[in-house]
Amino acid sequence: MAELSRRTFLAASTVLVATPAVAAASAPDPLLELINELKAGDAAFAAGPSIMTTEEENALIATTYGPPWQRVVNDCPIPTTAAGAIAALEYALTQMPDDFEASVMEAVIEFLEAGRLA
């Protein structure tokens, strides 16, 4: 049996300790996934008929962007990555915020994109 040196032990320990962090870092961001689902729903809705009855429109909403929109409104997940936070802010900017909200969101996006988190 090979002798376990301090260097071998430390190298192995580093790998064991680093492995969970790598796994956690690669976990999907729940808000980023929800925003992507919402964007896909928006696109599907936009591809629908341009003239609909109210009932048809409500049915299309229920099968496109409606469910993810309701999850954002009722139980919005916290982003786990800067990319998730940026995507949420960028999407929020598409929802016609007033000048104040838009300016604040744009400043926060710039901050996150620059990686200035401390």
Image: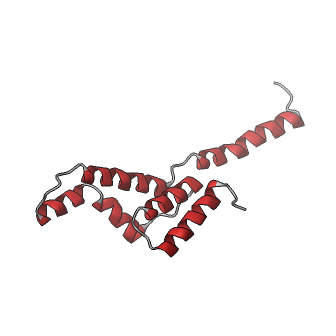
Q: Is residue 109 left or right of residue 8?
A: left
Residue drawn at point x = 33 percent, y = 66 percent: 70
| Place of residue 78 in the rendered image (x, y in percent of width and height, measured from the top left) | 51, 64
Does 20 sit above or below residue 58?
A: above
Quarter of the image with the N terminus in it: top right
Residue drawn at point x = 87 percent, y = 35 percent: 7
Residue drawn at point x = 58 percent, y = 60 percent: 109
Instruction: Using the rendered view, name the quadrant where residue 91 is placed.
Output: bottom left
Task: State the residue lying farthest toward the right.
Answer: 6
| Place of residue 33 in the rendered image (x, y in percent of width and height, measured from the top left) | 44, 52
Nearer-the-camera pick, 107 or 74: 107
Q: Is residue 39 left or right of residue 104?
A: left
Image coloring type: secondary structure
Q: How many marks?
A: 0
Instruction: Using the rendered view, name the quadrant where residue 3 is placed.
Output: top right
Task: State the residue lying farthest toward the front.
Answer: 99
Does 22 sit above or below residue 104?
A: above
Quarter of the image with the C terminus in it: bottom right
| Place of residue 89 in the rendered image (x, y in percent of width and height, measured from the top left) | 50, 62
Nearer-the-camera pick, 109 or 59: 109
Nearer-the-camera pick, 38 or 48: 48
| Place of residue 86 in the rendered image (x, y in percent of width and height, measured from the top left) | 54, 57
Residue drawn at point x = 45 percent, y = 74 percent: 98
